[in-house]
């Protein structure tokens, strides 16, 4: 492999290709991520792997996950939002388990769970001084 990495090492990672969460009920997960979170549905490779367009990357749900991936065990996805207080209110109105909104030095965040119990965060960057 050629590129700009160190000699004898592959090129550095240049972007996030996608993040996928294992789910037990694909239609329920699609309804949650599309209708509750408002993600734009992207490619459907079959009725078990559905992508959502998120900025320059893709978030996917996988109803037929690889060995070791279990519904309700995924963590780490954080979605950038314009108004975290409004999104927090919206999630509560839809019965979503969501934490309080935390105020960090450079951002606001809250943490929630999808219908399978997979954890995700909502993030709103504060304006830079």
Image: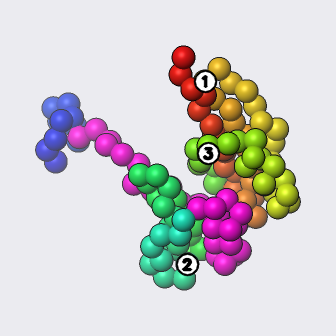
Can you see residue 50? yes
Residue occupying the point 67% across, 42% down: 83
What residue is shown with label 1? 106
Nearest to N terminus: mark 2 or mark 1: 2
Please provide percent x and percent y for residue 42.
Answer: 47, 69
What residue is shown with label 2? 48
Q: Are marks 1 and 3 in contact (CB under 8 Å)?
A: no
Please provide percent x and percent y for residue 17.
Answer: 39, 54
Write down the region rendered in magenta: 11-39
Please provide percent x and percent y for residue 86.
Answer: 75, 46
Q: Quadrant of residue 27?
A: bottom right
Number of dots carrying numbers? 3
Judging from the image, the colouring scheme is rainbow
Nearest to N terminus: mark 1 or mark 3: 3
37 sits to left or right of 57: right
Q: Name the outermost residue toward the bottom.
A: 47
Front position in the image: 7 or 20: 20
Q: Name the outermost residue toward the top.
A: 129
Quarter of the rendering occupied by the C terminus: top right
Q: Quadrant of residue 73?
A: bottom right
Residue occupying the point 70% across, 42% down: 84
**Label 2: element kind:** loop
Crowding at mark 1 (Cα within 10 Å: few <14, some 14-19, many 20+):
few
15 sits to left or right of 107: left
**Label 3: element kind:** loop
119 sits to left or right of 128: right
What residue is shown with label 3? 81
Please provide percent x and percent y for residue 9.
Answer: 22, 37
Front: mark 2 or 1: 1
């Amino acid at each position: 492999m050629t590129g700009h990495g160190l000699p004898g090492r592959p090129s550095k990672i240049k972007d996030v290709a996608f993040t996928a969460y294992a789910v037990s009920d694909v239609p329920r997960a699609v309804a949650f991520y599309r209708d509750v979170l408002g993600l734009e549905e992207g490619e459907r490779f079959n009725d078990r792997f559905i992508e959502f367009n998120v900025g320059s990357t893709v978030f996917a749900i996988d109803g037929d996950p690889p060995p070791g991936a279990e519904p309700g065990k995924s963590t780490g996805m954080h979605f950038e939002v314009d108004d975290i207080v409004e999104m927090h209110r919206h999630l509560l109105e839809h019965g979503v388990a969501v934490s309080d909104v935390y105020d960090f030095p450079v951002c606001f965040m809250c943490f929630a769970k999808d219908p399978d119990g997979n954890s995700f965060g909502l993030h709103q960057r504060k304006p830079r001084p």
